Amino acid sequence: MNTVPEIGISSCLMGNSVRFDGGHKKNRLITDILVNHMDVQTVCPEVGIGLGVPRQTIRLQDIDGETRLVASKDSQQDYTDSMSEYANSVTQKYSQLDGFIFKKGSPTCGAFRVPVVVHKDGHRRHDGIGLFAKIFMEKFPWIPVEEEGRLNDSDLQQNFIERVYALHRWHAIPNPDENLTAFIEFHATHKLMLMARNHAEYRYLGRWVAETNYQNLKERRQGYIEHFMLVMRNNVTKGRHVNVLMHIMGYLKNKLSKADKVELLNSFESYRNSYLPLSAILLLLKHHLRKYPVPYINKQNYLEPFPQEITI
Ligand code: SF4
């Protein structure tokens, strides 16, 4: 088991010259920051099916109501079947990845709102998914997926990295099909992360864990992680974070001085009004929790969802 998360990345984002024009789309967030904390598997599916570099452009096109992957200049050159076959044959080796970053807009790698040509005049809709990315996401709906363009949004970026590290902790469970203790502990240490996202789902997953035992663990754990990762997709609003911060503070209320409490409450308001980042509030809370440990709270991954060194 890797000690750091392992993610897949569209090869051109790593600076590899595999694009149709012989170029690349190196992404600094990935190459300068993320790869220092994660192992990376790169793939260029178009090169994988034998297309050369450089090569003619391809696109998604609606043909008789079906989305096909075809040459931009000649829709008779259809790569749908070869790409599907390639994706189905290679993606199984990615089943243990903790995340995947795809190249936005690509008819092969784009994960969201990829253009699909619907008319001879070039008219497009923007609801397609690159064929390789689509097959990957259908096979592994629980693995976090993002595009490099969306990672420029700090909320989406934070959410993606949190999900990658959560799945990495899941994959790190030893002897998982028989390890009920670790399964319960995984849930216990992610409670506040779930609570911040959706209270009803937090309770639903709590019941899921309560109904799991040594006999049914093997069959129920996959259902758990699929639902867990679905909930984790939700971005957390400032208001929801403040609710969780208040919840944590509730555990400290008998320990903190009046001045400490006022300072904390003021910091929550500063965070709500965007004067302070969440990391500053968590630092303050961790300081108090070191002084007055509360076992249930101290072990929450919410306090440090990924290593602080990943400064973005
Ligand atoms: S977007 Fe995907 S298929 Fe296109 S060059 Fe990059 S890795 Fe290759």
Image: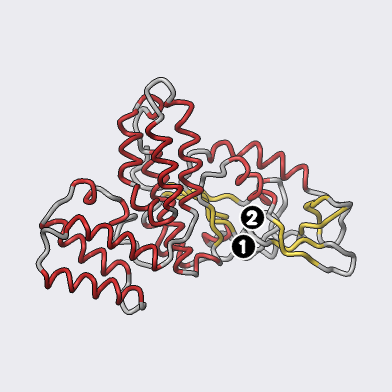
- Please tell me which residue is depicted at 14% across the width and 69% down the height of the picture: 260
What amino acid does circle 2 point to? Cys
Residue 139 sits above or below residue 147 on the image: above
Q: Amino acid at mark 1?
A: Lys
Which type of secondary structure does the marked residue at label 1 adopt? Answer: loop
In front of the other: 148 or 193: 193
N-term-proximal mark, 1 vs 2: 1
Residue 302 located left or right of residue 97: left
Per the image, the residue denoted by label 1 is 104
Asked if residue 20 lies left or right of residue 204, the reply is: right
Q: Position of residue 175 (x, y in %)?
A: 36, 27
Q: Residue at x 68, y 51 (%)?
A: 46
Q: Which mark is residue 17?
A: none
Quadrant holding the C terminus: bottom left
Q: How is the image coloured?
A: secondary structure
Quadrant placement of the N terminus: top left
Q: Quadrant of residue 21?
A: bottom right
Question: Residue 187 appears at what percent x and percent y?
Answer: 35, 41
Q: Nearer the viewer, residue 111 or 16?
A: 111
Question: To which residue does mark 2 refer?
Answer: 109
Question: Does the residue tagged 2 have its C-beta within 8 Å of any atom of ligand 1?
Answer: yes
50 vs 226, left or right, is right
Tell me if label 1 and label 2 are in contact, CB under 8 Å: no
Q: Residue at x 79, y 52 (%)?
A: 67
Mark 2 falls on what kind of element?
loop
- Pick out the residue farthest to the top: 215
